[in-house]
Image (cartoon, rainbow, N blue to C red):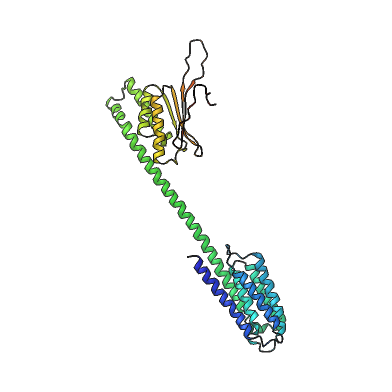
Amino acid sequence: MIAIPRLLLVGLAAIFSSFHLVLGVSALDVPSNPWPGVVAMVLYTVATALSLFPLRSVRMPVGIAAGNVAVSAVSLILVLPQLDPDAENGYATWIIGAIGTLMTITVVRQRALFAWTGIAVMVLGILLWTRDPLQLPELGVIGGPIWVGIGQAATMAIVRATRDARLFELAEQRAAEWEAQEEAEFSERRVRLGQMDRVVAPMLRAVIAAEGRLSADQRRECLHLEAAMRDEIRGRRLLDDRVRQEVLEARRRGVEVTLLDDGGIDDLDRHQHARVTAVIAQQIGDSTADRLVVRTARPDDEVAVTIVGLRDAAEPAGTDEEEPTLELWLEVPRTPGDEKEPGADDSAPG
C-alpha cells in the first residue's frame, strides 16, 4: 500500500519531465546548431532518471543534488547560445521548464538548498542571455520558482505531519502500555487481597472474639500469617497453593523460611512454572534444615531457582558461636532435567 502511491508519483514526474524533451525535439530546427541541444537533452534525461531512481531514503543524495545544479548550468550554456534572444524561439527554450521541473523534483526529495541554487543559476543564465528582465515572465522563468516554492511547502507539511503522526503513535503505545500495567497491577492486588482474606480473615475473627487475649500458640500462628503476607510480596511466582502450605508447615516446625523472587522466572510458561514450584514444595516439605532460602536466579541463567538449607551449629556453653553448616544446595533448572545437588564432598558456595 505504500509502494503504489510512490510509484505513481514517480511515474507522473517521469511523464511530466519527458514532456519537456518532446518539446525540445519538436523545436530542434529552430537553433542554428541542434547538437548542443541534443547533448543537453541527454544530460537532462540522465539527471532526471537518477533523481527519480527509487532509494530507501526519500532524501536525495548530495551528489545527485549537486549534479542536478551542474546539469542545469551546463544545459543553459549548451542551449541558449544557439538561440536568438530577440527572435520568437517557441519551444526551443524547453530547457527553462526542464530546469524548473528538475529543481522541483530536487526540493521534493528534501534538497531545498540545491533546488533554489539551481533556480538562481537558471534566472542568472536567462538574464545574461536576454539582458532584459521584462522577458522573464514571457519565457516562463517565473514558473520554476513557483513550483519549487510549492514543492518545498508541501514537503515541509508532509514531513511535519509524518513526525506528528509518529509522536502520536508513540504516545498511543505508551498510553496502552500504561493502561495494561495499571490493569495488571490492579488484577494482581485483587488476587493478593483475596488470598490474604482467605488466610488472615479467620485469625482476625479469632483475635476479635478473644478480645486480643491470645494464647502462645495463637501468637505464633499470627507470626506465621504475617510471614505468609511477606511471602506474597517478596515470593510472588515462587508460590502456589502447595508451596504456601509446605512453607506454613515448615514454620510451624520452627524452620525459618525466606522466599525471594527477583523476577528470574517470569518468563516460564505454565507447565515449567508448575514443575519448578513442585520441586520447591517437595524440598521444603522434606528438609530438616533450620533455615531455608529459596531465590530465583537471573533471567538469562540456565538455573531457575536455587534452594539453600542451613543447619545452625550447636553452641556449647563457654564457646564462640560457630558458622552454620550447609545441609541443602539445590539448583532447579529452567528446562526439565536432573537438579544439581552437591554430594557430601562438595563445598558450600561462597
Q: Report the residue that reaches farthest toward the left.
A: 209
Is any atom of residue 94 visible in this view? yes
Residue located 41% across and 31% down the image: 279
Q: Is residue 131 visible?
A: no
Q: Residue furthest bottom?
A: 87
- The percent coordinates of residue 178 (x first, y second) are 44, 49
Residue farthest toward the top in the current orientation of the protein: 318
Quadrant housing the C terminus: top right
Instruction: Examine the rendered structure and indicate whether residue 118 appears above or below residue 183.
Output: below
The residue at 32%/23% (across/down) is: 218
Q: Which residue is located at x 49 percent, y 24 percent?
A: 343
Does 123 appear above or below 53?
Answer: below
Q: Nearer the viewer, residue 328 or 154?
A: 328
152 relative to 256 in the view: left or right: right
Residue 177 location in percent, x, y?
Answer: 44, 49
Q: Nearer the viewer, residue 34 or 107?
A: 34
Residue 33 location, quadrant: bottom right
Which quadrant would residue 87 be assigned to in this image? bottom right
Check the image and report above or below for 320 versus 179: above
